[in-house]
Image (cartoon, grey):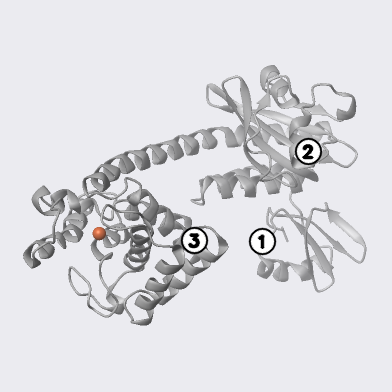
Amino acid sequence: MRAPYWVLGYEVNGKLFGKRSNDVFKIDGVRFYTIFEDADTKVLKRLKDAAKFGDLEIMDPNEIIPFIAAQLNSSISLLTLLKRIQHSICSILSAEAASILVHSGDHLEFLVTEGGASGKIESIPVPMESIAGTIFLEDRTMIFNDLMKDKRHFKGVDKAAKFVTKNILGSPIWTGEKKFGVIEVLNKEGGFTEEDAKLLEKFARLIGRKLYSTITGDRMKKLIKEIVLAITSTIDKRDKYTHEHSRNVARISVMLGRKLRLSERELEDLEISAMLHDVGKIGIPDSILLKPGKLTPEEFEYIKNHTVFGAEILSKLKHATDNMISGALEHHEKLDGSGYPYGKKNGEISLFGRIVAVADMYDALTAKRVYKKEWTKEKVLNVLKEEAEKGKLDRKVVEKLEELVKEGAL
Ligand SMILES: [Fe+2]
C-alpha cells in the first residue's frame, strides 16, 4: 500500500520507515510523521494496519515536491499558502525555519517566514551583501553550513527575531525571465547536504511562476481597492462626512466578519461591499444631500433611495456578488422591519447587510460631525446594544463589536 505524499515516515515498535518530521500523529501504536500540522487523521487511521505490518510504502522526498507545488493552484490566500508550503519544506528537509525573500530595489524583503522568526522580521530590509543577497546575485543554490565564521551572515534579522541561525540552504527563485527572490531554509541538525540542495532547487523552480502571477493578482486587487476608495471618499466628502467614513466602515466590517469566521473570499467581498455601501448617494441631488436645515419628510424619503441606487450601480458590475450588492441595499434595514428601503425582517436581511449596518452606525456615531461632537466608544456601544435589545440590530454582530472595543482593536 502506498502512503499519500504528505506522510514522510512512520514508526512501529521502535522501527522507523521513511523519515521523521515535526508533525507527529500517534495512532494505535503507530507514530506517523507528516508534512502538515493539520494532516487528515481519518486517512492515517486507515493506513495504520498496513503500517503495523510494515506494508506501507513511503514516497521518495524527490517525488513529493510536485504534489506540494500543485497546492499552489488552490484558492487560499497567498499568505496562508506560502506559510503552508514553507512548513512542508521545513518538514521535508528537517529544518527549523524557512523564508521567502523578494528582491526590491537595492535590497531583499521578507515576503513570508515560517518558524521561530515569523512575524518579527518581515519589515527588516536585508542587504545584498548578506547570504540571501549572495545567493540572489550569484544565482545558484548554495549551502552555508558554518555561519559562525561567515562574515556575510546578516545578524540584524537574528537579533530582531531572537533567533540563532546556524546554517542556511538557499536557492534563487525565477519567475520566467525575471529573477524574483530567494527561498531559504535554516538550521538543520548536522548541516544541509547536496541532496537537500537539489530538492530545494527543484522546489524553487516550481513555485516561481505561480508566485509571480499571484503577486501580480494581489497588486491588481490593491489597485482596484484604491480606486474604489478614491471614489467613495469623494462621496463621503460631499455628504459632509469625514472622508474616512467608507474606509472605516470597510475596516470595521472586515474585523467583524473575521470574528464571525467568514472565509477569506467572503472577507474580500465584504470589504468591497462596505467600502461602497453609500455609493448610491451619487444619485441624490445636492439640494437634498447638502441641505443645511432639517429635511422635509419627502426629502428624507428620497434620501432612502441611496440604498436602491447603490444596489443598482453594483448589480451592473459583472463581478459583483449578490452578497456585495446586499451590503449596499440592506445596510439601513432593521431586523424588526422598521428600516428602509423595503422594511425587510430577520432572515430576509443578509449577513453582509447586518454587518455593514453595525459598522456604519458605529463609525457615524463615534465620528465628529459639523452638527455634533464625537461620542465616546462606550456611549456608542451602549446605543448599539440597546438597538440589539430592541431587536433592530443583529445581537451577534453587536457582541463581536463589543469584543473588538474591549480588545482595543477599535
Ligand atoms: Fe447609508
Q: Which residue is mark 2?
A: 186
Q: Label 2 amino acid?
A: Leu
**Mark 3 vs 1: CB contact within 8 A:** no
Mark 1 crowdedness (10 Å alpha carbons): few <14, some 14-19, many ≥20: few
Number of other residues with Cα within 10 Å of mark 3, as a class: few under 14, some 14 to 19, many 20 or more: some
The image quadrant where one finds the N terminus is bottom right
Q: Is residue 156 above or below residue 328?
A: above
Q: Secondary structure at mark 3?
A: helix
Q: Is mark 1 within 8 Å of ligand 1?
A: no
Dot 1: element: loop
Is there any visible trace of residue 268 in the rendered image?
no
First reached walking from the N terminus: tag 2 or tag 3: 2
In contact (CB < 8 Å): disc 2 and disc 3: no
Q: Earlier in the sequence, mark 3 or mark 1?
A: 1
> Residue 258 has which mark?
3
Q: Please, what secondary structure does the residue beneath circle 2 have?
A: strand
Residue 389 x, y percent position in the rendering:
38, 81
User: Height in image: 324 above or below 340?
Assistant: above
The disc placed on residue 303 is none
Ligand 1, image quadrant it occupies? bottom left
Return the x and y of residue 190 as percentages of the image width and height: 90, 39
Which disc, if any, is residue 38?
1
Q: Is residue 179 above or below residue 312?
A: above
Q: Quadrant of residue 274?
A: bottom left
Foreground residue among 39 and 128:
128
Of residues 249 and 32, the one nearer the viewer is 249
User: Amino acid under label 1?
Assistant: Asp
